[in-house]
Amino acid sequence: MEKREFKAESKRLLDMMINSIYTHKEIFLREIISNASDAIDKLCYRSLTDEKVGLNRDDFAITLTIDKENRTLTVSDNGIGMSDEELENNLGVIAASGSLQFRRELDEAAETGDTDIIGQFGVGFYSAFMVADHVAVVTKKYGEEQAWRWESDGADGYTIEPCERSGVGTDVIMHLKPDGEEQDEYSQYLREYPLYKLVKKYSDYIRFPIRMLMPHPVKKEDTPDDKPEYEEVFEYETLNSMVPLWQRKKSEVTKEEYDKFYQERFGELAPPQSVITVAAEGAVTYKALLFIPSKASGLYGTDEFQPGLQLYSAGVMIMDKCADLLPDEFNFVRGVVESPDLSLNISRELLQHDRQLKIIAGNLEKKIRGELERMLKDEREAYEKFFRSFGRQLKLCAMENYGAKKDKLQDLLLFYSSTEKKQVTLAEYAGRMKEGQKYIYFAPGDSVSAIDSLPQTELVKDHDMEILYFTERTDEFIADLFRDYQGKPFRSVVDGELDLPDEGEKKDESEAYKEGFDFIKAALGDRVTEVKASTRLKSHPVCLSSGQGITFEMEKYFTAVQPELGMKAKRILEINVDHPAFVTFETTRIIDPERAKKYAEVLYHQALLIAGLPIEDPSAYTDLLCSLWK
Ligand code: ADP
């Protein structure tokens, strides 16, 4: 029989399992049982629409079998099973779903020396090798005649061969390692009571019975009642209580139980930020258990991430990721929804149009929004942390359909404030507006420090007014689409009139300096749309504004994502006519026009730099600057 090699990544993980120094080896049982439960879920779901399965919900079970003599522990299920191809693909390669996050967290753990990571992270099938030196998998897939046996001693590969198995399902047969010290006392997994405790600890909410032969003292028949003698009789017992967490009242469940459930079921390392429970009766009866993560992890934010809630009906999982239950803006929420009202044997496409599902989705949306609002009010720091991970998603959705979700989302958004030096809400900004202040001022730019030094912010700051720093590409679009917040329009300090309450602004003196401006415009040609006197500059000589329409930040955005559109903002060169640089330019223009042209270039390029826009020909510009020393 040919020995096959593990794929490189699997091999590495496997090595770690075999030589594991981890303190939570016992979690192997949880992992193997979870796989068995998933496999049963799949066949159970199938049985709803396929009569040939011939099993009812109650017929499904997971069985633990101890063989002390041969030192094996076997976990059996009557689930969907695997074909030989699936054996190869599933057990020869670490599951793609978990591998990415696991690798990342592992690197992190290596750095911090936190070796407990495996105890917290679902590592799947390979965890069997933490306790076993030989693992065999005997499996028969539903609908197939042939059963298969997969076998491996670990790192040097595995074999697959045909074999016999009476029904569909899978046995994972683990031959335990010889005992070492304490943690490595593998014989404990050959004793009923420790196994029972492990099932209680990690797998109590598994919704199918986990059975094992348990010893019971039974009175020997031929012994007298007043002097009874007992013998041990083994009977199958269901070890787990099977009541899913979401069916229990929130007051009866501890935070630890919720945390553990969340971490195990969704493969998360950190506990959730918030737990939301819903028990609804009425138009639709359902229970929901939702989690708001404390930070993004795993595939979140990548194309591979699949949002959605697990959907159960009458104890059967009918969908693993039901995306229709979550609005886009809350796609980070994890959880479970169970409703007896959902018709079971409808196809997944039909489910999307299910009226009941729509009602549930509507309610959940409100619950989630309510919880986020509560966090914002009561747990500000936690909300800010949450927002660092998921604020971008909220903002992206705020832009959807021309800002159609404004009312729903505007109060959940945060922006950096020039005066508070932290993230603030629009409501907080509005509440702090000065008398006579007509606008919500904002300044776009790449970073807080870049915006801080923008010359255009000076005048507004001089008036003690707050400016929101739009550091995300989305922010300006949102302001554009929302137009206002509670009737207070947004206004960029970079474009348009500032309209400050008193004589804060300078008069437009463009007419007085027309000759000079015409000279600059002629020198710069099409590169600028217009040259004018600035009403917003104080200590800086120049800035660029874009007038109405596309702004510089939008230009940068489109250049990055859709360069073919060639989107360009207008470039209006604003000049501070009181600045010594301009005064020097004006005198030079009369006595040495050639030199003055160079000054015009310098002014323009300074404005580009401040706006964070690229200089078209940096080396030519450097030459020009140096030529001014002559
Ligand atoms: P994960 O469960 O995270 O996908 P595992 O390494 O635990 O990763 O398992 C890999 C795959 O092997 C599973 O996704 C499943 O398809 C298959 N598998 C494992 N155990 C069983 C089982 N008892 N019955 C059927 N398929 C199984």
Image (tube, helix red, strand yellow):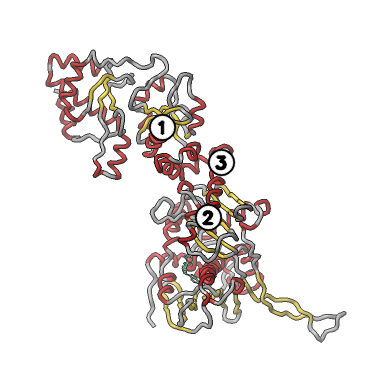
Q: Label 3, label 2: how many angstroms apart (C-alpha)?
A: 31 Å
Q: Secondary structure at mark 3?
A: helix
Which mark lies nearer to you, 2 or 1? Answer: 2
N-terminal of the two: label 1 or label 3?
Answer: 3
Query: In the rendered picture of this protein, how many numbered marks are placed on residues?
Result: 3
Question: Which residue position holds label 2?
Answer: 355
N-terminal of the two: label 2 or label 1?
Answer: 2
Taking depth in this image into account, of 329 and 346 the one nearest to the observer is 346
Q: Is residue 162 above or below residue 515?
A: below
* Image location (x, y in percent) of residue 503: 38, 14
Q: Residue at 45% x, 53% y: name it.
A: 108
Q: Quadrant of residue 339?
A: bottom right
Q: Secondary structure at mark 1?
A: loop
* Image location (x, y in percent) of residue 378: 59, 38
* Image location (x, y in percent) of residue 449: 38, 32
Question: Which residue position holds label 1?
Answer: 483
Q: Label 2, label 1: how many angstroms apart (C-alpha)?
A: 35 Å
Taking depth in this image into account, of 582 and 287 the one nearest to the observer is 287
Is residue 115 visible in the rendered image? The answer is no
Question: Which residue position holds label 3?
Answer: 375
The residue type indicated by label 3 comes to Met
Q: Secondary structure at mark 2?
A: helix
Q: Residue at 48% x, 68% y: name it.
A: 126
Q: Label 1, label 3: how many angstroms apart (C-alpha)?
A: 27 Å
The residue type indicated by label 1 comes to Arg
Q: Quadrant of residue 441?
A: top left
Q: Residue furthest right?
A: 226
Q: Quadrant of residue 589?
A: top left
Taking depth in this image into account, of 290 and 287 the one nearest to the observer is 287
